[in-house]
Amino acid sequence: MEKSIVAAGSYVVGKKKSAVLQAYLGTCVGVAIYDPTKDIGGLIHLILPSQTSPESTYEPLKYASSGLPIFLNALYEAGAKRENTKAVVAGGALVGPLSEWDLQLDIGGRTLEVVETILTDEGIEIETSETGGFFTSRFSLDMSNWECDIDPCISKSPPTLHELSTPEPDKINQTIEHIQPIPQVALKILRMVDEDTHHFKDIANEIRNDQVICARTLRLCNSTFYAKAKRIDSIDHALVFLGQDLFVRLVVSVFIKDFFEHHNHGYSLCRGGLYHHAIGTAIIAERIARLTQKVSPTLAYTAGLLHDIGKVVLDQYIALASPFFYREFQEGIDFLELEKKYLGITHTKVGSQLANNWYFPDSLIDTILHHHYPENGTRNKELTHVVYLADLLMSRFHAGFELERLNTDSLASRLESIGFSISQFQQVLDLIPTTSFASFLSAT
């Protein structure tokens, strides 16, 4: 049966067919609405209750207050009748570990309130509502019979303890040594970005030296997301068409894709989960950097893309342990402490070792090592704080890609370090990408 993922800030409407719509929900809210008499239905994936900042880029499907009415109109235009429609609502979790700001903001709870108000005013019966809780869930609508399922993303039944064993440090070191390094041309571009010395001609010359990266970059430039009427047939043309900053981000994403994409059974909660999370974090980090003007947006994008490279090394070892992680989230145990408990080492430490072996710039090594606790950074604290915040937003509002939770006990001071206050946090939420994120993923 065909399965379609409904990304955050989007919806799908259609007639009865052999297909399943799915949304991965953490703090977000999913709403499935269907008319069984006309055999029309769909699902929408909402991020926030309402727009929080008039200066932000307005994406109406992101918000319950504007997105749900748009979704309802699409259903009615497709032939559904208001008086016959039924709804199922899911999500709005307080994804642990909890902190005071979770309870103060109660973003998922307020999104649910807006959804319930709109549906009540519309006279639509909420047939089932499974909301709140502490876990990421998978919300499914079977379009062949209009049945809905709400399941945890990870099984709550862990393997028996005798099936688990902490990997030997030598094994992890061997894995680090045997991972194929990223191309030299990519490392040169990373250094250019870190030193803020990247120029059109330099970048173009480096890319021409690697036929694989050159071909893949041109293919991505000509994808449906980027291409216009005129085909891009050279690196120089791509630079002119996209502009230097977007071009650099695109190239970095190209060479990282293969590195992440083959790992789907440990940290990943869906196919390509590590890469999806990396791209989303990179996009949000770039937006935060542009807003705060504390660090280079291109450097922020690159650091966001690379922050979890240590998970590639540990992915094969965590597959059996992942149910234990899931079970212990509700107990408030720190994510890095859980990694130490079951793996003997953290993905941040392994990632910094890998980055050091590959001669990454110091600022990127430091960000990879400290992005869970950015105040411990020593090389570029503002960059580390930007990536921390981007990672936090991605894990809370684009749930379902990978297994991770960030500590928020010091969120106020971490926000202040890049010029934000807790009262402005909801404005920061408007930086979360929706349609552009989905389009970029399909293009890459």
Image (cartoon, rainbow, N blue to C red):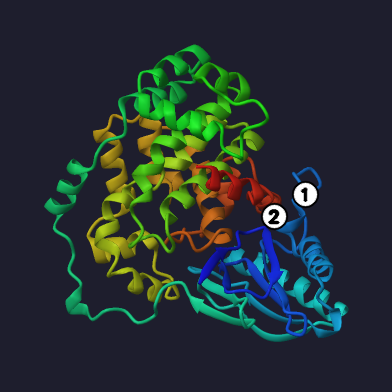
How many numbered circles are shown?
Answer: 2
Q: Is residue 238 above or below residue 171?
A: above
The three-letter amino acid code for the residue at tag 2 is: Gln
Classed neighbour count for the residue bearing mark 1: other residues with Cα under 10 Å, few (<14), some (14–19), many (≥20): some
Q: Amino acid at mark 1?
A: Ser
Residue drawn 18% across and 41% down?
177
Q: Position of residue 383 (x, y in %)?
A: 49, 36
Cα–Cα span, label 1 and label 2: 8 Å
Q: Residue at x 59, y 36 (%)?
A: 289
Q: Earlier in the sequence, mark 1 or mark 2?
A: 1
SS for dot 1: loop
Q: Which one is in front, 320 or 235?
A: 235
- Label 2 sits on a secondary structure element that is helix
Q: Quadrant of residue 317?
A: bottom left
Q: Which residue is mark 1?
A: 53
287 relative to 150, above or below: above
Q: Is residue 8 left or right of residue 276?
A: right
To which residue does mark 2 refer?
Answer: 426
Binning the other alpha carbons within 10 Å of mark 2 as few (below 14), some (14 to 19) or many (20 upward) gives some
Residue at image position (26%, 41%) is 353
Q: Does residue 177 appear in the picture of this structure?
A: yes
Q: Name the mark on residue 374.
A: none
Which corner quadrant of the image does residue 211 belong to? Answer: top left
User: Cβ–Cβ below 8 Å for labels 1 and 2?
Assistant: yes
Q: Position of residue 11 (x, y in %)?
A: 68, 62
Up the image or down, 248 lies above or below 289; here it is above
